Image (cartoon, rainbow, N blue to C red):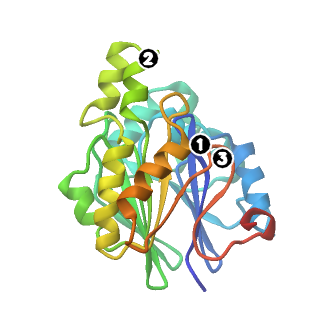
Amino acid sequence: MELTAYTLASSSKGNSVWIKFGSDELLIDAGISCRRIESALRQLDDAPPLSNVGAVLVTHEHSDHVAGLPTLAKKYHIPIHMTEDSARAMLSSQKYLPTADFITVHPRTFEIKVGEITVRSFATPHDSASSVGYLVSAGGRTIAIATDIGHISDTIENALTGADSVILESNHDVNMLLSGSYPYELKRRILSDRGHLSNENAAEFARRLAGSGTRQIVLAHLSPENNIPELALTTAKLKLAGTGCGISVAKADAPTLVCGSPVSEEVGA
C-alpha cells in the first residue's frame, strides 16, 4: 500500500484534497459542492464516491473550504473535525447548522487517526477564527497541506520540514495584485502577514523544503484574478533548479495528483 493524494479542486474559489491509504480515505476541506466532490472521486476510484471517506478535516471556516459540508453531512453523515473557534465561527451562519451534529471540535493543535492514517494539525497565520494546516502520515510517508498562510511562520517551517510531499499555497503574483482591480483594503488584507502567500515567498520556502528532503511540491490555492499557473510554476522552478524536487500546479477545477501512483489512467495521463 502507498499513501496517495489528489487535490480535487484548488483556488480561491474552492478547495478540497482527497487522501487514500489502502481502504482508508479522508478529505481535507470541502470548499466545493458535494456534487463536484462526487464527480471528481468517480474519476479516481472504482468505489462509490465518498463510500470509504472516514472523515473531513477542515483547515478553517471560510466558504472556499467549507461550502460543501452541509450537503456532505446530510447525505453521508461523515464525521467532521475542525478547531473549536473555526466551528463556532462557521456555525454562526444558519446554512451550516446541519453540520453541527457531525462536528468534533479540537484545540488548534490536535491529532486523530482515520484507520491507519494519522493526521496532525499545526497553526497557520490567516485572518480566520483559528486556521490550521495538516500533516497526514501513513506507510512511512508524510503529506503536508499548508494553504491560506500570510507568511511562513516558525510553526509552519518546523511542521513541514522533512515532509515527503507538500501542498503549498502560491496565491498571487504581487505585481498582478497591486496593478489589479481589487479594492485597496482587499489588497492590503491579501498582502498582510495573515493573508495569502505570494509566488515569490512560496518559491523561497519550496527551496528550503527541497533542502530538507521534500521530493514533490504542488502549488495550490492560486488566485484566478491575481495569478497565472505558468507564472507560479516558473517562479518556483527557478528556485528549485538542481534540487531534484518535483514541482507542479494544482488544477482549479479537476483532480491533480500530489503523490502516489495515479488511481485512474484517464486522470494520470
Q: Quadrant of residue 206?
A: bottom left
Amino acid type shown at disc 2: Tyr
Q: Quadrant of residue 243?
A: bottom left
At x 69%, y 50%, the residue is 254
Give the camera-side residue of 19 and 154: 154
Query: Helix, strand, or loop for circle 1?
Result: helix
Marks 2 and 1: in contact by CB < 8 Å?
no
Give coordinates of residue 247: x percent, y percent: 49, 62
Which badge, 2 or 3, comes first in the chain's sequence? 3
Find the distance from the CA under tag 2 to the CA under tag 3. Answer: 33 Å
Name the front one of labels 1 and 2: 2
Asked whether the viewer can see residue 58, the reply is no
Find the distance from the CA under tag 1 to the CA under tag 2. Answer: 29 Å
Disc ID at residue 69 = 1
Asked whether the viewer can see residue 147, the reply is yes
The C terminus - image quarter: bottom right
Give coordinates of residue 143: x percent, y percent: 45, 68
Left or right of 164 in this view: 160: left
Q: Residues within 10 Å of mark 1 (few under 14, many from 20)?
A: many
Query: Helix, strand, or loop for circle 3?
Result: helix
Q: Residues within 10 Å of mark 2 (few under 14, many from 20)?
A: few
Marks 1 and 3: in contact by CB < 8 Å?
yes
Residue position marked by numbered label 3 in the rendering: 72
Amino acid type shown at disc 3: Leu
Amino acid type shown at disc 1: Leu
Which badge, 1 or 2, comes first in the chain's sequence? 1
Residue position marked by numbered label 2 in the rendering: 182
Give the camera-side residue of 125 and 63: 125
Q: Quadrant of residue 160?
A: bottom left
Give the camera-side residue of 65 and 214: 214
